């Protein structure tokens, strides 16, 4: 199997998050990466910040992040 090289530098960022479990889904057609910190998310509020990400909250606690244009924003990191 020919697996392309993967830059694993992001792992240190993930380990700093205060969540024991992180689920991810990528919609290739929409180029959107979804990160969920609780399943089900059941967000009752969402805020789009200046960074372009959408942060989802339930009862004031972060439960997920939507990252639009994921491949354009994150695939340009050096390997």
Image: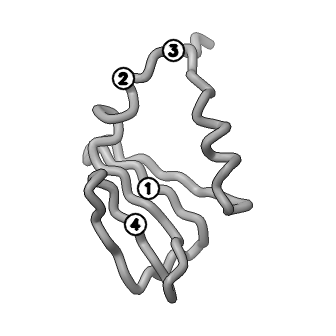
Residue underneath mark 1: 34
Q: Choose the circle earlier in sequence order: 3 or 4.
A: 4
**76 sits left or right of 48 in the view:** right
* Residue in front for this viewpoint, 5 or 18: 18
Instruction: Determine whether the residue tagged by mark 2 lies in a helix, strand or loop.
Output: loop
- Judge whether 29 appears above or below 40 on screen: above
Q: Is residue 8 above or below residue 15?
A: above
Give the farthest residue toward the right. 20
Q: Earlier in the sequence, mark 3 or mark 1?
A: 1
- Find residue 15 and report its horizontal and vertical position in percent: 70, 47
Q: Position of residue 63 (x, y in %)?
A: 53, 71
Which labelled disc corresponds to residue 79? 3
Mark 4, residue position: 55
Residue at image location 30% in from the left, 51% down from the top: 51
Q: Is residue 20 left or right of residue 23?
A: right
Label 4 sits on a secondary structure element that is strand
Q: Quadrant of the N terminus?
A: top right
Circle nearer the N terminus (2, 4): 4
Q: Does residue 3 lie above or below 59 as drawn?
A: above
Instruction: Give the CA separation, mark 2 to mark 4.
Output: 23 Å
Distance between the Cα atoms at labels 2 and 1? 19 Å
Q: Position of residue 76 (x, y in %)?
A: 36, 23
Dots 3 and 2: beta carbons under 8 Å? no
- What residue is drawn where x is 49% and y is 84%? 60
Gap in Å between the C-alphas at discs 3 and 2? 9 Å
| Residue with the mark numbered 2 | 76
């Amino acid at each position: 199997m020919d697996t392309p090289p993967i830059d694993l530098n992001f792992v240190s960022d993930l380990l700093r998050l205060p969540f024991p479990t992180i689920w991810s889904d990528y919609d290739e057609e929409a180029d959107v990466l979804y990160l969920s910190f609780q399943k089900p998310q059941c967000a009752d509020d969402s805020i789009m910040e200046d960074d372009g990400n959408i942060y989802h909250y339930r009862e004031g606690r972060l439960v997920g992040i939507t990252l639009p244009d994921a491949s354009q924003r994150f695939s340009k990191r050096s390997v």
